[in-house]
């Protein structure tokens, strides 16, 4: 896949997150925002000759000159991946644990990361 494909997938995940937000599916909106962030950083890694190693946006950005806002966004999104990757890590978590503000924050974070990557890659 070339970088446009990954960024295209990132945009699809972000669009889906926005639709899920509008439908009131906040947990899923958070998760698809995280997926958008993951797809966004892959071209950056490949452009540097690195591979996607670990399903953590923050971990994969280690070693890059990244503004605080992007690192903070990566932390936010990584937190939303846990309940999907490790369901037992957050016992009794249901959609009621997620709210609109969290989903909006996740979507903003995904947009920040995507914007950073696009700017970095030119």
Image (tube, rainbow, N blue to C red):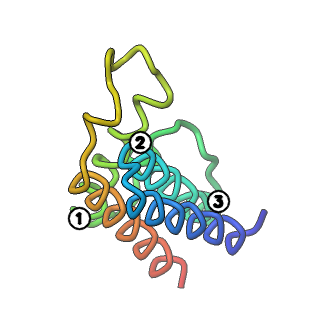
**Whether residue 48 is situated above or below residue 24 in the rendered picture:** below
**Whether residue 24 is situated above or below residue 110 in the rendered picture:** above
- Considering the numbered disc 2 on the image, is that residue within a helix, a strand or a loop? helix
Query: Earlier along the polypeptide chain: callout 1 or callout 2?
Result: 2
Is residue 62 visible to us here? Answer: no
- Considering the numbered disc 1 on the image, is that residue within a helix, a strand or a loop? helix
Residue 105 point in image, percent of width and height: 26, 59
Q: CA distance from mark 3 to mark 2?
A: 15 Å
- For residue 99, side relative to residue 82 (left or right): left
Q: CA distance from mark 1 to mark 2?
A: 15 Å
Q: State the residue at coordinates (25%, 55%).
A: 100
**Whether residue 102 is situated above or below residue 120 in the rendered picture:** above
Circle nearer the viewer, 1 or 3: 1
Label annotation for residue 59: 2
Tag 1: Cα neighbours inside 10 Å, few (<14), some, or many (≥20)? Answer: few
Residue 5 point in image, percent of width and height: 72, 69
- For residue 51, side relative to residue 57 (left or right): right
Query: Earlier along the polypeptide chain: callout 1 or callout 3?
Result: 3
Farthest-out residue, right: 1
Is residue 53 visible to us here? Answer: yes
Label annotation for residue 69: 1
Residue 7 point in image, percent of width and height: 61, 70
Residue of label 3? 46
Farthest-out residue, front: 23
Q: State the residue at coordinates (24%, 55%).
A: 72
Residue 42 point in image, percent of width and height: 59, 57
- Considering the numbered disc 3 on the image, is that residue within a helix, a strand or a loop? helix
Q: State the residue at coordinates (40%, 30%).
A: 82
Pointers 3 and 2 in contact (C-beta within 8 Å): no
Circle nearer the viewer, 1 or 2: 1
Tag 2: Cα neighbours inside 10 Å, few (<14), some, or many (≥20)? Answer: some
Q: How many marks?
A: 3
């Amino acid at each position: 896949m070339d970088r446009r494909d990954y960024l295209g997938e990132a945009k699809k995940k972000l669009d889906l997150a926005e639709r899920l937000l509008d439908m009131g599916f906040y947990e899923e909106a958070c998760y698809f925002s995280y997926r958008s962030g993951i797809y966004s950083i892959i071209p950056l890694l490949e452009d540097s000759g690195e591979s996607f190693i670990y399903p953590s946006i923050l971990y994969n950005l280690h070693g890059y000159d990244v503004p605080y806002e992007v690192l903070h966004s990566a932390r936010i999104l990584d937190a939303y991946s846990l309940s999907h990757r490790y369901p037992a890590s957050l016992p009794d978590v249901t959609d009621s644990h997620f709210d609109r503000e969290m989903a909006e924050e996740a979507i903003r974070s995904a947009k920040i990361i995507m914007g950073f990557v696009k700017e970095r890659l030119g």
